[in-house]
Image (cartoon, helix red, strand yellow):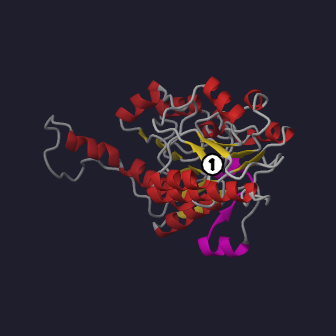
Amino acid sequence: MAIRKRPKVFITRKLPDPVETRMRELFDAHLNIEDRPLAQPELVAAMRESDVLVPTVTDRIDAAIIEQAGENLKLIANFGNGVDNIDIDAAARRGITVTNTPNVLSEDTADMTMALILAVPRRLTEGAQILTTDDGSWQGWSPTWMLGHRIWGKRLGIVGMGRIGTAVARRAKAFGLSIHYHNRRRVSQQTEDQLEATYWDSLDQMLARVDIVSVNCPSTPATFHLLSARRIALMKPGAYIVNTARGGIIDEAALIQALKDGAIAGAGLDVFEHEPAVDPKLIKLAESGRVVLLPHMGSATVEGRIDMGEKVIINIRAFVDGHRPPDRVLPGRN
């Protein structure tokens, strides 16, 4: 079905001003100025009235909602790399194309991953809180004050060696970490040689041998609770977990119990299983210094968000012009 020259594009959240301005120039764009998450009935109404929907990770576009889409809706141009918020198969059955915004957030997310890898063993947030708490607890430098653990020479196990995982590995190698990884497919020999990386086809075996685990794989049905209670129990008592991917990849209840029991040393989390809710037990652990918590800000840079918006615009324009969008997500990708 042909889409009119200026398609009606509904954007579910506020985007950077340069992106919104360009969308208004090119399309009949409906903006969310208040940046208020849409309730389900509002999302359904938008899909009934629009030619193109631009959702984000906070919008759950499941099969039931897709079935209520209007006849004119032919493109869901996701503002984000991950598409676990969209039922790709259901969209395909309705003849709706789905696109995403890959390859623009790898470096930003890898930066934040590395920050957490440093923050947890070196107790950075604990130290910062001491200086902002007016209780007189800091009396100056002491040889035994706020001792953390060195990361130089430790083993980092990367779960998911895609673009982000590889970017994390490059940073970690510069910090003197030994790189280990588990992935569905082995990376190229050249990449392994450059990173001096050790490949493990068994995730269980890798988890038992590394000092820090970095979760960088996509969220799919196959990776839900990939780090289960059984797998967390394989880790060393002195090991740390860092997650900047998706919260559901780790069994959060099992992680909390392991931290409480001292079965692992700590965790750095930028994502949560029931986001935006954060388990109060995690917050308590953070207050005690066992966990560093961030509010899903791993990819939050001005440059990254603008790059994402430009990808969305390119995908929409290609589709409207009758071409295959460059970032089309095919059914069965997971």
> Splitting the image into 4 quarters, where does residue 287 fall?
top left
Q: Bounds of the magenta span? A: 189-206
Q: Is residue 44 visible?
A: yes
Give the camera-side residue of 243 and 322: 322
In screen coordinates, is 238 left or right of 54? left
Residue lying farthest front?
5
Residue lying farthest right?
93
Residue to which mark 1 is pinned? 207
User: Residue 148 at what x, y percent from top left?
Assistant: 35, 50
Task: Specify whether residue 264 is painted magenta.
Answer: no
User: Residue 100 at what x, y percent from top left?
Assistant: 67, 51
Q: Residue at x 65, y 50 (%)?
A: 217
Give the camera-side residue of 129 and 275: 275
Q: Residue at x 79, y 29 (%)?
A: 67
In screen coordinates, is 183 left or right of 36? right
Q: Does 180 appear above or below 62?
A: below
Q: Does 190 appear above or below 22?
A: below
Number of callouts in the render? 1
Q: Is residue 105 visible?
A: no
In screen coordinates, is 227 left or right of 214? right
In screen coordinates, is 92 left or right of 317? right
Q: Residues within 10 Å of mark 1 (few under 14, many from 20)?
A: many
User: Residue 182 at what x, y percent from top left?
Assistant: 69, 55
Please, what secondary structure does the residue beneath circle 1 have? helix
Give the camera-side residue of 105 and 182: 105
- How would you classify the magenta stretch by its main secondary structure? helix
> Splitting the image into 4 quarters, where does residue 87 fall?
top right
Task: Specify whether residue 199 is painted magenta.
Answer: yes
Task: Give the residue type at disc 1.
Answer: Leu
